[in-house]
């Protein structure tokens, strides 16, 4: 079963949050790497990001209406553009590949070395019973490396943050704390 995101972009006007009709496509489409970063949802590669913090008490009327039937919704949260922009995204932007632990051990035993810039993670979060069973049956490690600056621009997270910055510009918002996304997920 798939997981989808539901998002409302809000801006602060005269000390109240107002929901916008527009929302960057990056925060409306299914992208599990993005979900993992935003709220630890579908986190199969141990992306370090944010944990859900619930809906804000002061959310806009548009958000209240959007999320009023929340019986099937989970991992409710919100993040300001400032939080998104200033967060450490190196793990979210990293290229990652799972390899079988037995192969990795043999590779090291035979003198194999990873190229500069590549590293192995072998302590990662198990997000589901399926992950736990798979790892018990066939233990793995994750090899990761950082992309170039040009490659980073292709990531959904990067494009979504840039789209939010454009919304801020269009609405004359200079303080990135005055623009946020309110979001949750369904299965």
Image (cartoon, rainbow, N blue to C red):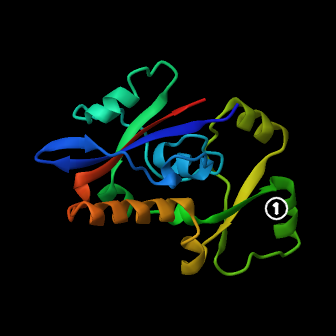
Q: Residue at x 34, y 34 (%)?
A: 63
Q: Residue at x 74, y 33 (%)?
A: 130
Q: x%, y% of residue 98?
A: 76, 56
- Image quarter hosting the C terminus: top right
Q: Is residue 86 visible?
A: no
In which image quadrant can residue 88 be found?
A: bottom left
- Image quarter hosting the N terminus: top right
Q: Nearer the viewer, residue 34 or 145?
A: 34
Mark 1: few/some/many CA within 10 Å (<14, 14-19, 20+): some
Q: x%, y% of residue 104?
A: 82, 61
Q: Is residue 64 visible?
A: yes
Does 144 appear above or below 68? Answer: below
Marker count (numbered): 1
Tell me: 43 left or right of 89.
Answer: right
Residue at the limit of the structure toward the left, as seen here: 14
Q: Which residue is mark 1?
A: 104
Tell me: 117 left or right of 97.
Answer: left
Tell me: 139 left or right of 124.
Answer: right
Q: x%, y% of residue 40?
A: 52, 43
Does 38 appear above or below 187? Answer: below
Q: Nearer the viewer, residue 39 or 178?
A: 178
Q: x%, y% of residue 139?
A: 79, 46
Q: Nearer the viewer, residue 77 or 40?
A: 77
Q: Residue at x 51, y 59 (%)?
A: 157
Q: Secondary structure at mark 1?
A: helix
């Amino acid at each position: 079963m798939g997981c989808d995101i539901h998002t409302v972009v809000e801006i602060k006007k005269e000390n109240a949050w107002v929901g916008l009709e527009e929302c960057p496509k990056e925060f409306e489409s299914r992208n599990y790497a993005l979900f993992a970063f935003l709220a630890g949802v579908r986190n199969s590669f141990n992306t370090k990001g944010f944990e859900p913090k619930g809906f804000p008490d002061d959310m806009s009327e548009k958000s209240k209406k959007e999320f009023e039937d929340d019986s099937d919704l989970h991992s409710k949260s919100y993040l300001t553009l400032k939080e998104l922009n200033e967060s450490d995204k190196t793990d979210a932007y990293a290229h990652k590949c799972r390899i079988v632990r037995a192969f990795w051990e043999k590779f090291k035993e035979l003198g194999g070395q990873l190229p500069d810039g590549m590293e192995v993670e072998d302590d990662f979060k198990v997000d589901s019973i399926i992950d736990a069973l798979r790892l018990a049956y066939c233990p793995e490690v994750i090899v990761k490396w950082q992309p170039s600056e040009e490659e980073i621009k292709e990531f959904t997270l990067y494009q979504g943050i840039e789209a939010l910055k454009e919304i801020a510009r269009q609405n004359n918002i200079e303080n990135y704390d005055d623009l946020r996304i309110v979001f949750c997920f369904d299965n």
